[in-house]
């Protein structure tokens, strides 16, 4: 699956726009990550345990988006973006989304 943040794919022609595809993941840090993150907040700096939770959530949301596009019969995703929203204390939604398209070699 070709995925780009751009609105076209050099060397390809879009022959069908199939619509929006998305992958959604809801994450909260585990007890260990929460404890380590809380301690790090006291001294300041990058909170690596939280960064790991965020990165895994992005990977999972991306994979779900690609699965959605595959199920729709798409060849590629254009205009791909991430969005994240905290909707409860220490709980975030990560959304990967884009436009599913069918393409042919130009």
Image (cartoon, rainbow, N blue to C red):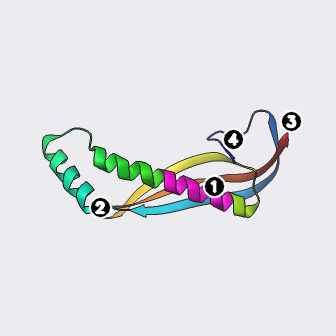
Separation (CA) of disc 1 from disc 3: 23 Å
Identify the residue position indicated by label 1 in the image. 66
Residue pictured at 29% horizontal, 44% vertical: 48
- From this view, report whether residue 9 is shown above or below residue 99: above
Vertical placement of residue 64 versus 105, above or below: below
Distance from the alpha carbon under mark 2 to that under mark 4: 37 Å
Which circle marks residue 106 in the picture?
3
Disc 2 versus disc 3: nearer the observer: 2
Name the main secondary structure of what is drawn in magenta: helix
Q: CA distance from mark 4 to mark 3?
A: 15 Å
Residue of label 2: 30
Location of residue 16 in the rendering, given as x and y in whole percent from the top left corner: 82, 53
Region rendered in magenta? 59-69
Taking 16 as reference, is 10 above or below it? above
Quadrant location of the C terminus?
top right
Q: Of the residues tagged 1 and 3, which is closer to the observer?
A: 1
Q: Which is closer to the viewer, label 2 or label 4?
A: 2
Of residue 33 and residue 46, the one placed in the foreground of this image is 33
The residue under label 4 is 7
Question: Could you tell which of marks 2 and 4 lies nearer the N-terminus?
Answer: 4
Query: Circle 1: is it few (<14), some (14-19), or many (20+) Cα within 10 Å?
Result: many
- Dot 4: few (<14), some (14–19), or many (≥20) neighbours within 10 Å? few
Confirm whether the magenta stretch covers residue 1.
Answer: no
Under circle 2, the secondary element is loop
Q: Secondary structure at mark 4?
A: loop
């Amino acid at each position: 699956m070709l995925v780009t943040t751009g609105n076209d794919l050099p060397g390809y022609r879009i022959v069908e726009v199939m619509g929006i595809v998305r992958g959604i993941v809801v994450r909260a840090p585990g007890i260990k990550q929460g404890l380590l993150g809380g301690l790090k907040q006291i001294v300041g700096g990058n909170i690596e345990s939280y960064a790991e939770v965020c990165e895994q959530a992005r990977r999972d949301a991306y994979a779900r988006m690609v699965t959605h596009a595959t199920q729709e019969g798409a060849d590629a995703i254009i205009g791909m973006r991430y969005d994240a929203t905290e909707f409860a204390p220490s709980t975030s939604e990560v959304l990967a989304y884009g436009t599913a398209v069918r393409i042919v070699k130009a």
